Image (cartoon, grey):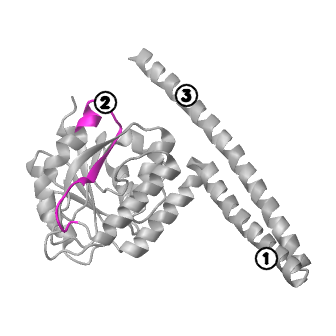
Amino acid sequence: MPNRDDVCVLLPTLNEAETIGDVVDGFREVGFEHVLVVDGDSEDDTRSIARDHGAEVIVQSGSGKGQAVREGVDAIDQPYVLMADGDGTYRPADADQMLEPLFEGRADHVIGDRFADMEEGAMTRLNQVGNRLINRLFSVIHGRNLQDILSGYRAFSRESFQRFQLDADGFGIETELAVECVRQGVDTEVVPIEYLARPGGSETNLHPLKDGGRIILTLYTLARTNNPIFYFGSVAFAGMLLGVGLGGFVGYAYFVNGVTRQVMALLSAFTILLSVQILMFGVLSDVIVTVNREQARRLDDISERLRELDD
C-alpha cells in the first residue's frame, strides 16, 4: 500500500496568513512531509508563514484558484495529490479516509462531502442553498450525483488529473474537475468529512453571488461536450417557446383585431424551424459523444491489458 511519502498536500492560497501556519502544521503532524503552497501573490505574510512552518511555496504566474491548482499539480512529483484549502476549514485528520479509495485502487478521484458533517456556522444559509442547487443541476445535466461537487477537499492520482482538460481560473475548477471525472469515466468516490467554520479573523475569498453565477455558467457551458442533448435541447426549447409565443401573438392580432403581422409571422416560423434544427444537431452530437466514449473506453482497456502484459 502506498504511504504518505507518495502524497503531496496541495494548498492554493490567497491572503491566508491567519490560518496557513496551522493548516501546514496540521498536515505535517499527521505524517505528510510534502506540502506545497501555491500562492496567488498574497498581500499579507502567507508565503513567509508557510515556509516557516515547513511547506514548499511557489507563486502562481497568474490569478485564480483554478490556475493555482493546475500549476501546483505540474510542480508535484508524487503520484498522489491531496488538495485542500488554506483557510482551516478542512481537517487533516480526514486525510486517511480521503486517500483510502486511492490506495486500495477503488478510485482515482475522491471528493470530500462537506454536508455529511458540517459545523454550525461553517456555511451561510445562502451558500448552502446555492451549493445544493448547483449539485442538483450537476446531477440533472451530467447524470451523476457526486453529493458535493464544489468541495475543495480532493484526493486524486496525478495521472488521472493529467487526462483532464481544465481551463477555469477561479472557483469553477471544482466544477470542471467533477465534469471531467464524468466525461473521462474516471472512477470517483465520495467520502464523508467534517467541514469546519473559518477561524476568527480570517476572511473568505468567495463571493457567493458572483462566483455562484460563474459556477452555474461553467456547469452549463461544459454540458456542450458532456451532455449535448441537454445543452442544445435547452437552447432549442427556449427558441421553440419564443417561436410559438410570436405565432400566438400573430394569430391573436389577426383573428381578434384583424391585423396582419407578416414579418412577425415569418420570424415565428423561422425561429421554430431553427429550433428544430438545433435539436436535431443536439441529437447527432449526443450520438457522436456516445461513440467517442465507447471508443475511448475500448482504447483504455487495450492500454491496460498491454501494461499487464509488460508487467
Asked which quadrant contains residue 204, the reply is bottom left
Question: Which one is earlier in the sequence, the residue at label 3 or at label 2?
Answer: 2
Q: Residue at x 47, y 47 (%)?
A: 180
Q: Is 111 colored magenta in this rendering?
A: yes
Pick the front one: 197 or 29: 197
Mark 1 highlights which residue?
A: 249
Q: Residue 113 placed where, x, y %?
A: 28, 51
Q: Residue at x 55, y 28 (%)?
A: 299
Pick the front one: 52 or 194: 194
Q: Residue 40 placed where, x, y %?
A: 32, 69
Mark 2 highlights which residue?
A: 105
Residue type, label 2: Gly
CA distance for labels 1 and 2: 60 Å
Does residue 83 appear anywhere in the picture? no
Question: Which one is earlier in the sequence, the residue at label 1 or at label 2?
Answer: 2
Q: Depth-wise, is mark 3 or mark 2 nearer the camera?
A: 2
Q: Depth-wise, is mark 1 or mark 2 nearer the camera?
A: 1
Q: Residue 191 placed where, x, y %?
A: 26, 44
Question: Dot 3: within a 10 Å radius of its alpha carbon, few (fewer than 14), some, or many (20 or more) residues?
Answer: few
Pick the front one: 71 or 231: 231
Question: Dot 2: within a 10 Å radius of its alpha carbon, few (fewer than 14), some, or many (20 or more) residues?
Answer: few
Describe the element under mark 3 as helix, strand or loop.
helix
Left or right relative to 267: residue 186: left
Mark 3 highlights which residue?
A: 299
Describe the element under mark 1 as helix, strand or loop.
helix
Residue that sits furthest to the left in the current view: 29
Residue type, label 3: Leu
- Say if 78 sits above or below 119 in the image: above
Left or right relative to 160: residue 263: right
**Which segment did they paint magenta?**
100-122
